[in-house]
Image (cartoon, rainbow, N blue to C red):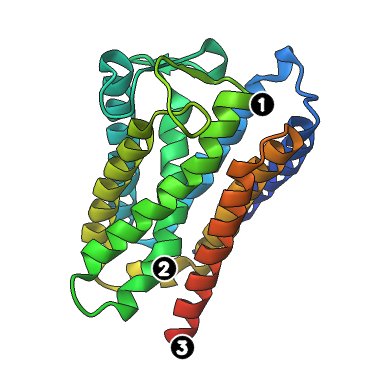
Amino acid sequence: METNFDRRIFQFFTIWYVIGVFLLSFSLVPPWLEWANVVFLITSGVVSMLFFYRSSSKLSGIFAIAVIFILSMAIESFGVHTGLFFGEYTYLGDFGPKVAGVPITIGFAWVMVMAVSHVMASGIISIVPKLPGLVYALYGAIIAVSLDLIIDPVAYEVKQYWVWHESGLYYGIPFSNFLGWFILSFILHLVLYALFSRGTSWTNRRSRPWKNRMIWLFGMMNGMFIIVAFAHGLMLAPVLSLSLTAVYYGIYYIMKGGRK
């Protein structure tokens, strides 16, 4: 069901997004306005939570949100304190208030990542006759990791939201980070498949506007980090992300056409 609140919250996010892209691209965010980045990530998480809540039964939607938020925060906290799973890193203080060493914005960001990768990957169910859940989870995890290929270089190189205590070939980011992203997102996609693979909720017929918003949000998040990366002299990450984003959209619309 579409409500005025739904439309207004997405409109607010869109306005905040446009302003943020401009300020970040030209390094116009003053220190006293750093909190705006926190609001942006939390709002992206809120609109993604609304997608899950509106697109399925209320209980399934709330359970999906809770599992993604709690598990991602727990794994991130485990990684921060042990150096395992994602590699050794430390979040800095200007990324929002922390819980167990992890900014709460991370939980909201993971809900956003899972919402957009779920929608982009969900169509593959209709064209895979065998082990569709496994194929969906693998493809969804690949899409999620692809998002991190542009998010991490900008957050680390440009904004310095966290620092790595080890290095890697890709912008100094250790490979374990991307492996951790893949494992966590794969597990979370299996949860989503178990929750939503039956009934109309899988194709989000209850709230088509929110499904369409997640398609837009996937492009908006990639687009923002691509623009900021180019503006700050990063080349490999935005070119790679732009290419992968085009591939995922192409596959999505081919699958969508095949379902008609």
Tell me which amino acid carries mark 2: Asn
The quadrant where residue 38 appears? top right
Q: Residue furthest front?
A: 169
Label number found at residue 260: 3
Residue at x 30% of width, y 22% of height: 79
Residue 10 is situated, as x and y percent measured from the top left of the image, at: 62, 50
Tell me which amino acid carries mark 1: Ala
Compared across the picture, whether 218 is left or right of 203 comes to right
**Residue 72 vs residue 209, the one in the foreground:** 72
Q: Nearer the viewer, mark 2 or mark 1?
A: 1
Q: Nearer the viewer, mark 2 or mark 3?
A: 3
Can residue 57 be spotted in the picture? no
Q: Pick whichever of labels 3 and 1 is earlier in the sequence.
A: 1
Tell me which amino acid carries mark 3: Lys
Residue 211's place in the image compared with 60, above or below, is below
**Residue 136 vs residue 156, the one in the foreground:** 156
Residue 195 is situated, as x and y percent measured from the top left of the image, at: 24, 58
Q: Which residue is mark 2?
A: 204
Q: Pick whichever of labels 2 and 3 is earlier in the sequence.
A: 2
Q: Residues within 10 Å of mark 2 (few under 14, many from 20)?
A: many
Residue at x 61% of width, y 43% of height: 236
